[in-house]
Amino acid sequence: MQNIIFRETTSDDSSQTLIKMKKHWGGEPLVIRTKNYYPSKLNGIIAQLNDTWVGFLFYDLQGDDCEIVVFEVFEKFKGIGTQIIARLKEIAKNKQCKRIYLMTHNDNLDALRFYQTRGFHICGIHLNSMEFTRKIKPCPEIGDYGIPIRDEIDLEILL
Ligand SMILES: CC(C)(COP(=O)(O)OP(=O)(O)OC[C@H]1O[C@@H](n2cnc3c(N)ncnc32)[C@H](O)[C@@H]1OP(=O)(O)O)[C@@H](O)C(=O)NCCC(=O)NCCS
């Protein structure tokens, strides 16, 4: 964690965001239950070691809600994600948000563990919804730990 800085994004970050989205998430847009998202146009938090991004999170503010649109740490399980979420909570509270929420998939056991041990609750399960999402944007059939990617799972934390 030494020397990692956590900062909010600026407009100068959009080209690097596009590169990372292409490399790690199949490019923009991201599709979350039929809605398209463009992280390079959203506000976010970057974890940076010297000039290298070691993690990022982009969010969308919708009234009282703050939606995590994309969240990725490139050096996993070293505490970087925990720091990013702590900063997001501060930002969301300052913006008068009452809730942070997100969607992940049934195969993402690491994220389900991460969020639930940090106060998030499962608040919705959309069985087989990936069948529909795949008609909008291709997505692999098999995900983490060899688990078929089928369902979208919503998690939330009240602030
Ligand atoms: C989920 C993610 C953002 C967490 O960030 P991170 O920097 O790895 O998380 P931290 O190091 O701060 O915290 C580790 C926590 O992850 C969880 N975890 C899940 N699987 C783990 C594993 N194999 N080893 C260690 N921790 C694991 C634990 O809850 C652990 O918490 P603990 O320290 O209380 O045991 C990161 O793993 C990631 O980028 N995953 C791939 C993309 C993704 O799934 N994004 C979120 C979907 S919206």
Image (cartoon, rainbow, N blue to C red):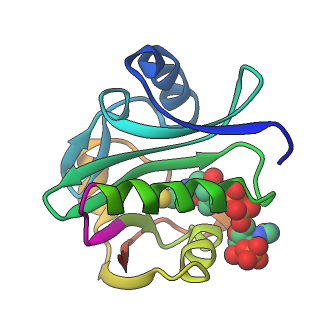
Quadrant where the C terminus is found in the figure: bottom left
Q: Quadrant of residue 11?
A: top left
Figure quadrant of residue 97: bottom left
Query: Can the viewer see residue 132 in this picture?
Result: yes
Percent x, y of residue 143: 58, 60
The picture places residue 40, in percent across and down from the top left corner, at 37, 27
Residue 114 position within the rendered picture, expressed as x and y whole percent measured from the top left: 62, 72
In this rendering, would 28 be left or right of 74?
A: left
- The residue nearer to you, when weighing 11 against 112, is 11
Name the residue: 36% across, 37% down. 43
Q: Nearer the viewer, residue 61 or 17?
A: 61
- Is 28 on the left-hand or right-hand side of 88? left
Magenta-highlighted residues: 95-101
In this view, 157 is above or below 54: below
Q: Is 76 situated above or below 146?
A: above
Q: Quadrant of ligand 1?
A: bottom right
Please give left or right for residue 120 compared with residue 112 in the image: left
- Residue placed furthest toward the right: 2
